[in-house]
Image (cartoon, helix red, strand yellow):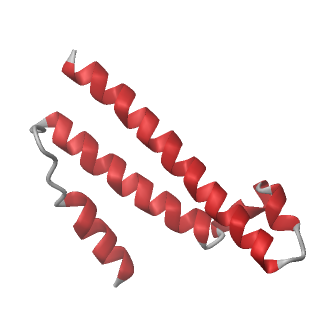
């Protein structure tokens, strides 16, 4: 049910002043972002071993590492989206 909700949210996204290819670009990036966040947060294929903070014994430090990984993913995806949007609109 969760993945159906993720796909429904991402593929029906409405973006102000976006239409056609730009709208679908935003939708696909939203889908990619949500799926990547799910994979990173729930340790799909051992992704969390890339985070040095996750190797710590204290659970609070490991949770902080997961949040930092999620924040890094969000920053990277939004930066790519902004760059591609600038290419489409110029």
Residue at figure coordinates x 70%, y 72% from the top left: 63
Please say if 88 is above or below 73: above
- Number of marks in the rendered image: 0
Task: Tell me which corner region of the image, top left, top right, bottom left or bottom right, holds residue 19.
Answer: top left
Please say if 1 is above or below 51: below
The quarter of the picture where the C terminus appears is top left
Task: Tell me which corner region of the image, top left, top right, bottom left or bottom right, holds residue 6.
Answer: bottom left
Outermost residue, bottom side = 1
Residue at figure coordinates x 77%, y 70% from the top left: 62
Relative horizontal placement of residue 62, taking residue 24 as reference (left or right): right
Outermost residue, right side = 57
Front residue of 67/24: it is: 67
What is the x, y in percent for residue 1? 34, 85
What is the x, y in percent for residue 34? 42, 61
Residue at figure coordinates x 69%, y 60% from the top left: 47
Relative horizontal placement of residue 90, taking residue 6 as reference (left or right): left
Residue at figure coordinates x 34%, y 28% from the top left: 84
Relative horizontal placement of residue 38, taking residue 57 as reference (left or right): left
Relative horizontal placement of residue 56, taking residue 40 as reference (left or right): right
What is the x, y in percent for residue 87? 29, 20
Please say if 43 is above or below 18: below
What is the x, y in percent for residue 65? 72, 62
């Amino acid at each position: 049910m969760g993945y159906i909700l993720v796909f429904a949210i991402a593929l029906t996204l409405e973006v102000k002043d976006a239409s056609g290819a730009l709208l679908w670009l935003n939708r696909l990036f939203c889908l990619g972002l949500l799926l990547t966040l799910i994979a990173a947060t729930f340790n799909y294929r051992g992704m969390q071993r890339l985070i040095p903070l996750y190797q710590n014994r204290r659970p609070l430090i490991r949770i902080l590492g997961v949040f930092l990984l999620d924040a890094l993913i969000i920053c990277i995806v939004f930066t790519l989206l902004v760059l591609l949007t600038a290419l489409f609109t110029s």
